[in-house]
Image (cartoon, helix red, strand yellow):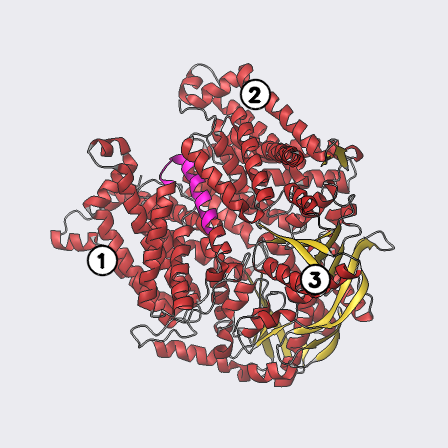
Amino acid sequence: MKKLAMAAFAVAVLSSAAYADTIKVGVIGPFSGPFAVSGKNFKVGIDAWLAVNGNKVGDNEIQIVYRDIPQADPAQSKSLAQELIVREGVQYLAGFYFTPDAMAAAPLLSQGNVPMVVMNAATSAIVTASPYVVRTSFTMWQNTTPIAKVAKDQGVTKVITLVSDYGPGIDAENAFKAAFEKEDGQVVETIRMPLSTNDFAPLMQRVKDSGAEALFAFLPSGPPTLAFVKAYNDNGLKAAGIKFFATGDLTPESDLPALGDAGLGLTTTYHYSVSHDSPENKAFVAAAEKAIGNPVELTFPAVGAYDGMYVISRMIEATGGKKDAKAAVEAVKGLSWTSPRGPVTIDPESRHITQNVYLREVGRDADGKYINKEIQTFEKQGDPGLAFVKK
Amino acid sequence: MTAPVEHSATVSPPVIRRLIDGGLIGALAIAVIGAAGYYLFPNNLALLTRMTAMALLVLSLDLVTGYCGVATLGHAALFGAGAYGAGIAAAHFGISEPLTMTLIGAVAGAVAGLVAGFVILRAHGLAQLVLSIAVIHLFHEAANKASRWTGGSDGLSGIMPNAVFGLFEFDLWGQTAYIYGLALLILVFVALKILVRSPFGMLARGVREDPVRVGAMGVSVHSVLLRVYVISGAVAGIGGALSAISTQVVGLDSLSFTLSAEALVMLVLGGTGSLYGALIGTIVFMFFEDTLSAINPFHWLTIIGALLVMVVLFAPKGLYGSAVALVGRFRRRQA
Amino acid sequence: MQTVFSIAVDALAYGMVLFVISIGLSVTMGLMRVVNLAHGAFAMIAGYLASYAARDLGLGYAAGILIAVVGTVIIAIPLERFLYRRLYGATELTQVLMTIGITFCVIGIANFIFGPTLKTIPLPPALQGSVDLGFRSIAAHRVFAIVCGLVVALALWFLIERTAFGIRLRAAVDNAAMAAALGVRTEVVYAVSFAVAIGLAALGGVVGAELLPVEPYYALRYMVTFLVVVSVGGAGSIPGALLACLVLGAIDTTGRYLAPEYGEFFFYLAVIVIVTLFPRGLLGRSKQ
């Protein structure tokens, strides 16, 4: 019986030659549940890319197969990835919002001869899990490091950090601390908040008592970020002149209308703003807004997906539609292009995206819409976090 | 509730009857269905393996909820303990022999069962439910904190199990993992079948029916329940270990309230108080979840919800329990 | 000393918000004996209605609350008639299965209709900004939540303990058959209580939206919190729920201030201790 399954598998693996005209891309993401906004943005980024570039690369037609993982669940991720590779016969795996999900699927890549394009999951270590992983999103270290410089430039010397108590939060804390101390700043206190925290008033009291001149915060986008920012305002921290620094996760465009005026003036660093001023971005946003229906929901995972599709299209081009993960990944190492977020390169060594990180301030555009307005650019940022990945 | 289920074999000779009672038919059924799954879905073995691990968790839950009447929304604590036990043994101590890992998982699960049982058994009904919720959150938080050992929210990776008996490698396509899991499930099922038929199993049921009377017999109700909890922990721990071995990553989700609630939903869906109900509930729920979410990854939750409501309306004893009741009524009418 | 006061204020505010949101569940669970895991789903429906009325239609906050409460009750009536009525007297597990099913449906529908983003309910100018307490400031809407909580607690207590309806309700809960024999129309009593419970869920959903913002997953995200609060207080006891909210609010807030990284541990250990010491909740009604 092993033979039978092996035969089925062999057919799946070798099927590329037979079906040269349709290339399936399996996308795993949170399309329902608490992170549905992000999953929706994956789909929108992909739809936008297909709308702009068409679904054909050479003679090959791209077909997307979506699979849902509502919350981080490595076992489910692995079984979905396997099902996609073997049953659906996908040539590329993409998506992945959560780190453990990407980690669980990574060991399948070399045996399945399938590259993985990570469109969000932001832990530095993912690219080391397999040589067939390419990432078009960001890492916590990448986006956090510049804000330490910003704080220093604004004359802040004492900072308190508040991060959600889980992997990415701890990454953000470490990254900020490392970068800020390099600038001779002092992190007076580090606070890790349970993910389920919904009332931040006591923490704001703690910030006041710490004597810090500014706070650095990371929370994953979602309901708590809203409560956090409101607590910052309501408890008089803003009035007391305590500055607010964060990564863009706190001010995703999809949350800005809910934040309203409470968000005005918040400074964050991030790799992408929907308001980025470039022809590439205008084209992207136009296509994406058409795909999403409600333009308010458009935010950062969409650009990771859009660029991920570009990378995949180049892989398809390079391999002529044949299933060859190694050649596909080789072909995009060092690849440079102008993304909606600005100039980017796939770093040949780490296979992670090198990109500009922007300092933004929440404001209003001419139509009164809340936006993240870019006010400073940190060019060609790699991933400083890789150095800390334990080998 | 589902006591009439068991009185079907009436005239068979005692030996055969004992074998049947010992779960031979059930074991055969699992083997046949398992083999059918293997041939029908050769490309989806990872899902079937996940079902098997989940079935172990739901069986273990049935033991405390169905047989002893303990209400718990925290049973994943036992499953997760097994998963992390096996995972940490492999990732940090280089113990990657799968049978040993499974054993470690069972022990870890049993210990977690002892701890969880110690807390949860201090109350009844709603209060018990809340204690179980507190327990699962404490376990989850503890694993999140101990990220040096557990990898925290990034998950514990680096688990590389050896070949089973040194012969069968854990291949990418999950054949070994599936067959290994199926074998575990059959063994556990038979063991549980024997257990629930044993005097001890009867005692446990007696506790559910009438704890006062059992107490009056001079038996400590608490100690009976605690022992059941430890056994249940071992079973869930085996499921967790299987998950760790087949996935090679352990995530915090294995210690989550969500997983606990899902297991309870599967159990009630199939029907409590019968091992078959636990298995059927798991298979039906996961099959629907997988199929619906593949058809429409965006809005499948609505349909699952509607299905659950339907089950309560039309099969209030769970799928298995109501099917048995239906068959029973049909037979009576014929007779 | 100032810090202690400050934490006390935060604890009171947080506890009262919890109370407003959870009290409806205490009614369903304690008086109607239904483990209604869909409580959060009703609160969420109300949040969406209020957001739609106040933000998209521009009707204002007060109108938003009214529309939300009435609208949610109207939505809930057919559910009571066709689904919940089957649950009265059913086992807890059956109730859990059905109400979780309803919750899944509501989440899916909300996601489909309103999309996955957060929705806000714009506050009137009077509730925006902060109130100065002398030693610190507190958000005005929290003061509003505290007042709402006190009003709800008093009104409910009066309804249950002091009115003819309350007597019928308690009779129907304690012994439905006997109450019916004495001429109490238990079906009506149950339907009205259910409507009251849903109305409270709706009010809580709207008033608490500043702290727990409205989004599709709301229905499941806070379910555990509601369940814990109600059980610690003693299902069905209004003063118990109030006390539980204040105690848990105080523990949670203090824990968060003193050792935020262990906040969860504090909270759940406290829950274990309280529930072990008071298995029926702090001020639970005894069983018959």
Q: Nearer the viewer, residue B304 or C66?
A: C66
Task: Tell me the residue at 71%/56% (across/down).
Answer: A246
* Res. B133 in view: yes
Amino acid at dot 3: Phe
**Secondary structure type for disc 3:** loop
- Determine which quarter of the picture holds residue C24: top right
Q: Say which element carries label 1.
A: helix
Give the chain letter at badge 3.
Answer: A
Checking the image for residue A300, the label placed there is: 3
Cα separation between marks 1 and 2: 59 Å
- Tag nearer the camera, 1 or 2: 2
Would you name the residue on which mark 2 appears?
C157
Disc 3/disc 2 C-alpha distance (Å): 49 Å
The Cα–Cα distance between marks 1 and 3, rounded to whole angstroms, is 56 Å
Residue A171, image x, y percentages: 61, 62
Q: Position of residue B195 (x, y in %)?
A: 23, 50
Q: Is residue A89 left or right of residue A278?
A: left
